[in-house]
Amino acid sequence: MNHNVADKAKSLRLNAPLPLDSGRELAPVEIAYETYGELNADKSNAILICHALTGDQYVASTHPVTGKPGWWERMVGPGKPIDTDRFHIICANVIGSCMGSTGPASDGESGAPYAMQFPVITIRDMVRALDVMLGQMGIERLYCVVGGSMGGMQALSLAANFPERVARVLAIATTARHSAQNIAFHEVGRQAIMADPNWQAGDYYNGDTPDSGLAVARMAAHITYLSEEGLTEKFGRRLQDRDAKSFGFDADFQVESYLRYQGSGFTQRFDANSYLYITRAMDYFDLAEEHGGKLGNAFAQSSARFCVVSFDSDWLYPTSESRHIVHALNAAALPVSFVELSAPFGHDSFLLDVPALDRVVEGFLSA
Amino acid sequence: MNHNVADKAKSLRLNAPLPLDSGRELAPVEIAYETYGELNADKSNAILICHALTGDQYVASTHPVTGKPGWWERMVGPGKPIDTDRFHIICANVIGSCMGSTGPASDGESGAPYAMQFPVITIRDMVRALDVMLGQMGIERLYCVVGGSMGGMQALSLAANFPERVARVLAIATTARHSAQNIAFHEVGRQAIMADPNWQAGDYYNGDTPDSGLAVARMAAHITYLSEEGLTEKFGRRLQDRDAKSFGFDADFQVESYLRYQGSGFTQRFDANSYLYITRAMDYFDLAEEHGGKLGNAFAQSSARFCVVSFDSDWLYPTSESRHIVHALNAAALPVSFVELSAPFGHDSFLLDVPALDRVVEGFLSA
């Protein structure tokens, strides 16, 4: 990708070095963000949307690299479930990413890109940066923090670690810890990137980028975002632009063609080192472990209302993981509504056309 | 891998060119095999065991490369469920593989290894070779054909396409067609191999082998062989040889270390081009499509008795796929017993310690 594309994004520099879970500090820290809708006078109508692994701040505006619509336009806008006529919506690129916030492609102290000198970060580190950002914006307490997938991890982490900061938490298709299988899939992706000779131990910013490895990583991950039934419905064993099998290694099947397209398209907009760092942060995520091994403890200081949503076809973060979160919230005596929605799209359901999700989101924000 | 290791295996040359589904022919065709137990006078006690994707003929004897025990020693041997005191067991390396049977690493007409000039083969092609082999061995009718995973595909294909050849069919943890998700995972593996610069469009036999790509392919596939619960039980989030996270990209988690070991170990014993060809054969497999689109038709000429076994934790070829096979056998009015066994190991359950499977196999072979 072109690492300069996000230069014109709105950006804020944190006014102090950011302490990290590793014991290191990150400075300076730039946070690129977008906002939608007006902040009211008493700053009580702010909603923070946290993005997923390969997401960004362009939740409801055109992506500057791909030219595609924002990733949650169906949810965010005037009169939509997250209503920009009513709320001030903030979405910031996480640290470690590559759309303007400080990450491995940013210049480090030496003046050259950090590359693998960038510190390993955690979900809590991402959230710590968001907390400072909100402080600098003068937003004491969010009306709500919302996130799907890794965004949901951040939403939970914010409620756990900065309980004063948030009145409502909407956590969708997420988990309070990465499972062995989750870690395994990410490790495959990391090994694919690191096996690409262009990776050069991360120092590729002046040369060819490890697109082949990154594409394989994306392909493997992408399968986990879809359900078996969704893949079968969408592609089945249908052939791509041909009447018969080629008896070769072209993309005979539509699903092969689709995956290759997903893989190569991804390399146009994402930095391979960011993929390494963010997957690592997700794998390290275990909210209970951070709080003495008991998930209920994580929420002991929170006074927020929670809404937890899972999808029946999501095998990446299945309903059992959401139930685990709900039990912990119950143990902490916090108000929580929980729903498992039926949708055929697997983990990606939170991004797609699931009208029931719209109603849940709208209802939770109205109450 | 060293491509000469299997030279001392038992081997048989097919006495005519082998016609292939692609319309091409393969000649000469060498079939490397192992046998266990004595063939009786009327040659009525032969059991053919068909191996899985990365399996081989060393079902109950030491693998010549790894030095490890045969892959199904728990099932095959004196007094074991597939009893070598009673049966003559044959296990042959499939064409396209790399343990002595003709495959992409074999010399083609030019005198150099076929590499990607090897014809694309199908499961039916593999079975066609096995049929000729059995004919040359003088074995008219098998007491039973047995296979798990891709071995089960071969067992079903043999019954469908060479119905006279087999009296009993035992198909374990298998499917009658590869699903979109099955194809997708294989495609990731193929792309990982092809992205390795050592692959050299398949012409690597005189140079460095594409081990990095093959290892990534194996890692991705390996996850699909295990269940989420099995991974959690075996590894959970436990760290590898350390008390705390490294905040680096080493294999902090046991599951990462395990996967890396699986990936690199595999490259010692398997040829990357064979992996491409055999995964392709599996992806092409659709037994119904071969028989006018109706799976029941596939078995119209068979007079065999069938036993179909699935595992409740197998998400690669889930029980629903076995049920699909059973319905087709019912439609063909063939005797079939079907059982879903409970085991925590996912797809790999057929290879592991599942005493209930032993009893099913023993019972079916006794009846």
Image: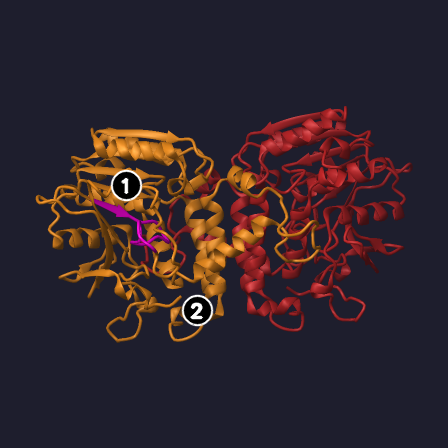
Chain colours: A orange, B red
Residue A158 position, x and y percent, is 22, 45
User: Helix, strand or loop at disc 2?
Assistant: loop
Rendered residue at 31%/68% (across/down): A117
Question: Are there few (<14), some (14-19), or many (20+) residues within 10 Å of tag 1?
Answer: some
- Pinpoint the chain carrying mark 2: A
Q: Secondary structure of the magenta portion, mostly?
A: loop
Q: Where are the magenta residues, as a range? A: A47-62
Q: With B367 as the anchor, is A292 left or right in this view?
A: left
Q: Is residue A53 magenta?
A: yes
Q: To which residue does mark 2 refer?
A: A209
Rendered residue at 49%/60% (across/down): A264
Q: To which residue does mark 1 refer?
A: A288
Residue B31 position, x and y percent, is 79, 54
Q: With B355 as the anchor, is A287 left or right in this view?
A: left
Precedes in sequence: disc 1 or disc 2? 2
Dividing the image into 4 quarters, which one contains the C terminus of chain A? top left
Give the amino acid at mark 1: Ala
Front one among B66 and B292: B292
Query: Residue A10: which disc?
Result: none
Query: How many numbered marks, from 0 up?
Result: 2
Hey, which quadrant is residue B102 in on the image? bottom right
Residue B361 visible at all: yes
- Pinpoint the chain carrying mark 1: A
Residue A122 position, x and y percent, is 28, 53
Question: Are there few (<14), some (14-19), or many (20+) residues within 10 Å of tag 2?
Answer: many
Rendered residue at 75%/37% (across/down): B292
Residue B77 visible at all: no
